[in-house]
Image: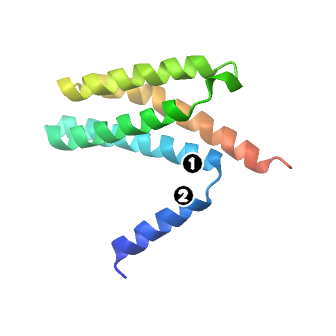
Amino acid sequence: MSAAALRARYMGDTVATASPQQLLVMLYDRLALDLERAETALVAGDRTAASEQLTHAQDIVFELHSSLRVDLWEGGPRLASLYTWLITELVQANIKADRNRVASCRQIVEPLRDAWRQAAASLADSPL
């Protein structure tokens, strides 16, 4: 089996056995990585690579938005609005190759990722 096939199998197994909290953190990790890669590609003048990363980031935000249950907690509607804003900014960043918009999205996503990571860790540490 090739290294790529082994890596794909490992990732598939990791996702299949992850808790909902771990999956959320994985999505945020990948979203932050996509934004970092898009920004790097835009700096390098590679619009194709930037577009691929921004499109993938949009897909992640769409998934986060569609799976959000706004009725379960008071912050739900605000988070839904934030996801809508992120989608709009990512689309505009892609259309205009706007590195500043990507950077603005990163400034929002990275602290959120860190907060979700802390929340997931505290849930994992709490007794059932």
As drawn, 117 above or below 70: below
Distance Cα–Cα, label 2 vs label 1 = 7 Å
Give the image location of residue 7, x and y in percent.
Answer: 42, 69
The quarter of the displayed image where residue 21 is located: top right
Taking the spot 53% from the left edge, 22% from the top edge, the residue there is: 80
Left or right of 80? Residue 56 is: left
Quadrant assignment, res 2: bottom left
Other-residue count near label 1 (Cα within 10 Å), few / some / many at <14 / 14–19 / ≥20: some
Residue carrying label 2: 15
Q: Is residue 113 left or right of residue 8?
A: right
Q: Is residue 104 left or right of residue 72?
A: left
Residue assigned mark 1: 23
- The residue located at (20%, 44%) in the rendering is 49
Name the residue rendered at 57%, 48% in the picture. 23
Looking at the rendered structure, the kind of residue marked 2 is: Val
In the image, is residue 99 above or below residue 125? above
Identity, as a three-letter code, of the amino acid under mark 1 = Leu
Contact flag, marks 2 and 1 (Cβ < 8 Å): yes
Please state which of residues 81 and 32 is positioned toward the viewer in this rendering.
81
Tell me what residue is drawn at x 34 percent, y 21 percent.
88
Q: Residues within 10 Å of mark 2 (few under 14, many from 20)?
A: some
